[in-house]
Amino acid sequence: MGGAFLLNFIQLLLMAVWALVLGRIVMSWVDPTGRNQLSAFLIQTTEPILAPVRRMLPQTGMMDWSGFLVLIVLGALWRAL
């Protein structure tokens, strides 16, 4: 019984983080400077996840692939559970 609760909680947590990262990607196209409250919130909550990934990836110019890579990893973890 407790294992099912823990599994559901982890899946919900992965889904929430996935949604935050997706929101960050979309908001980077609309408001890249983070001037409104929603953009600032998304930047503050996702930067601890995206910054280490961004440092590991090679520089690709204007495109930041760290968000897409995190979405792929989170999706794979979510489906693996």
Image (tube, rainbow, N blue to C red):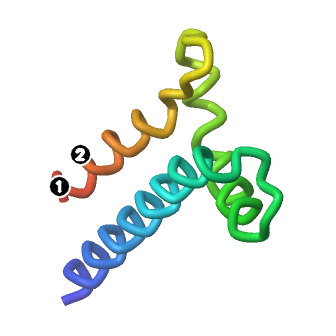
Quarter of the rendering containing residue 8 = bottom left
Circle 1 packing at 10 Å, graded few (<14), some (14-19), many (20+), is few
Q: Position of residue 3 (x, y in %)?
A: 23, 78
Q: Position of residue 41 (x, y in %)?
A: 72, 65
Q: Which residue is rendered at x = 55% and y = 10% of the image?
A: 58
Q: Quadrant of the C terminus?
A: bottom left
Q: Position of residue 10 (x, y in %)?
A: 35, 69
Q: Is residue 6 left or right of residue 17?
A: left
Q: CA distance from mark 2 to mark 1?
A: 5 Å
Q: Which residue is rendered at x = 70% and y = 45% of the image?
A: 32
Residue, disc 1: 79
Residues tagged 2 and 1 counted as in contact (Cβ below 8 A): yes
Q: Quadrant of the N terminus?
A: bottom left
Q: Position of residue 22 (x, y in %)?
A: 45, 54
Q: Which residue is rendered at x = 52% and y = 47% of the image?
A: 25
Secondary structure found at label 2:
helix
The amino acid pointed to by label 2 is Ala
On residue 76, the disc is 2
Q: Residue 37 or 21: which is nearer the viewer?
A: 37
Q: Quick check: 27 above or below 51?
A: below
For this orientation, the residue located farthest to the front is 30
The amino acid pointed to by label 1 is Arg
Q: Residue 51 or 6: which is nearer the viewer?
A: 51
Q: Is residue 43 left or right of residue 29?
A: right
